[in-house]
Amino acid sequence: MRVEDLVRVAGGLKRSAYAESADLARFEMNGSQKGPGDRLELNLADAMNGDPKTDVPLRDGDILTIRQLPRWSDIGASMTVRGEVLHGGTYGIAPGERTEFRLGAKRRVWSGTYAYGAVLMRREVRELELRPTWNLWSESKRRR
């Protein structure tokens, strides 16, 4: 099995994968003990394209580590728009971006809609609101 085969068997690369670099750690088997071996840095994109220098054959015990793109977790936020809107759905939102900018930027609301009457509902806050109040009181009392 080669690097490309391993990635394909695992289901392919995620969108968050940093394809320019991956680490391949190899361990030497000395009798029944594993000892430190080589560490190779591979260009994963080249390996996936069949480059023989980077698409190396794997050995038993090799560990391939694929990094995540820098700042990937910052771009995973989204908001869902529903109600009297032209184009409802789920939209990506950047950190610090205001919801009114997101709604007004593409003119997603009907011309007669009162946009300032929009309600922002966060999942975490909704779950807290649905919990029994006695449970919250007992938790706050335990913290004291």
Image (tube, rainbow, N blue to C red):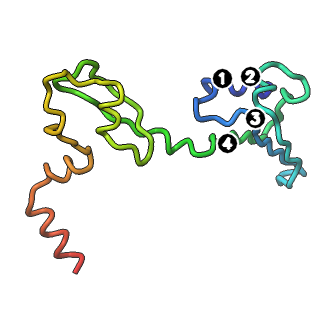
Discs 2/4, front: 4
Amino acid at circle 2: Asp
The residue that label 2 is drawn on is 5
Discs 4/3, front: 3
The residue that label 3 is drawn on is 20
| Quadrant the N terminus occupies | top right
43 with respect to 144 (left or right): right
Check whether the beta carbons of the residues at disc 1 and disc 4 lie within 8 A of each other: no
Discs 1/4, front: 4
Check whether the beta carbons of the residues at disc 2 and disc 4 lie within 8 A of each other: no
* Residue drawn at the location 18% of the way across and 34% of the way down: 115
- In the picture as drawn, the residue positioned furthest to the front comes out as 111
Amino acid at circle 3: Glu
- Position of 88 relative to 44 (above/below): above
Return the disc, 1 or 4, that comes first in the chain's sequence: 1
Check whether the beta carbons of the residues at disc 1 and disc 3 lie within 8 A of each other: no
Return the disc, 2 or 4, that comes first in the chain's sequence: 2
- Position of 132 relative to 95 (above/below): below
106 with respect to 35 (left or right): left
Check whether the beta carbons of the residues at disc 4 and disc 3 lie within 8 A of each other: no
82 with respect to 33 (left or right): left
Callout 3 crowding tier (Cα within 10 Å): few <14, some 14–19, many ≥20: some
- Label count reads 4
Amino acid at circle 4: Arg
Discs 1/3, front: 3
| Residue 105 sits in quarter | top left
Kind of element beneath mark 3? strand
Q: Which of 22 and 125 is in front in this view?
A: 125
The residue that label 1 is drawn on is 9
The residue that label 4 is drawn on is 67
Return the disc, 3 or 2, that comes first in the chain's sequence: 2
Alpha-carbon span between mark 1 and mark 3: 20 Å
